Each structure stands twice: as structure tokens, then as C-alpha cells.
Image (cartoon, grey):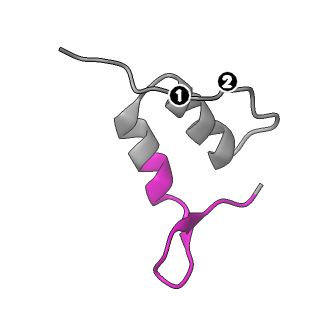
Amino acid sequence: ISRPMPCPVLLGTVKGGGLSALLHRYTIEKKVAKVEKVLKKGSYTSGAYPVFFF
């Protein structure tokens, strides 16, 4: 049985474009493969987490 992931907050919109807007849209649409692809395009700092520039 597939159940949706709970989200405790309402998701708004991201004005503008770029990777951050794509990441937001794909997250809302639950497109996991595309979210992973966008995350791989982030700039890594010190091998920690991807950083997105707005």
C-alpha cells in the first residue's frame, strides 16, 4: 500500500527560476528521480550538503 508522505506545512511557490524553483516544483509533484537529479547539480561545500544559489 502506497501512502503519501506527510507534510506538516503548506507548500507555497518559489518566484523566479533556477535550480531552487525546479527543486520546489518537483518536490510538490513528488517526482523523486527529478529531485535527486536537481540535488546532484548543487554546489558541494566541504563534502557536506549541496548549496543552491538564489
Q: Which residues are magenta?
A: 37-53
Measure the C-alpha gap from mark 1 to mark 2.
7 Å
Dot 2 falls on a residue whose secondary structure is loop
Residue beneath the point at 51% across and 68% down = 49
Q: Position of residue 12 (x, y in %)?
A: 73, 26
Q: Which mark is on residue 10?
A: 2
Q: Is residue 23 magenta?
A: no
Mark 2 Cα shell of 10 Å, populated few (<14), some (14-19), many (≥20): few
| Residue that appears at 65% across and 59% down | 52
Disc tally is: 2
Left or right placement of residue 37 versus residue 27 in this view: left
Where's residue 53, x and y in %?
Answer: 73, 60
Q: Which mark is residue 7?
A: 1
* Foreground residue among 3 and 18: 3
Three-letter code, disc 1 = Cys
Classify residue 25 by image quadrant.
top right
Which residue is at a point 48% across and 54% down the rendered structure image? 39
Pick the quarter of the image with the N terminus: top left
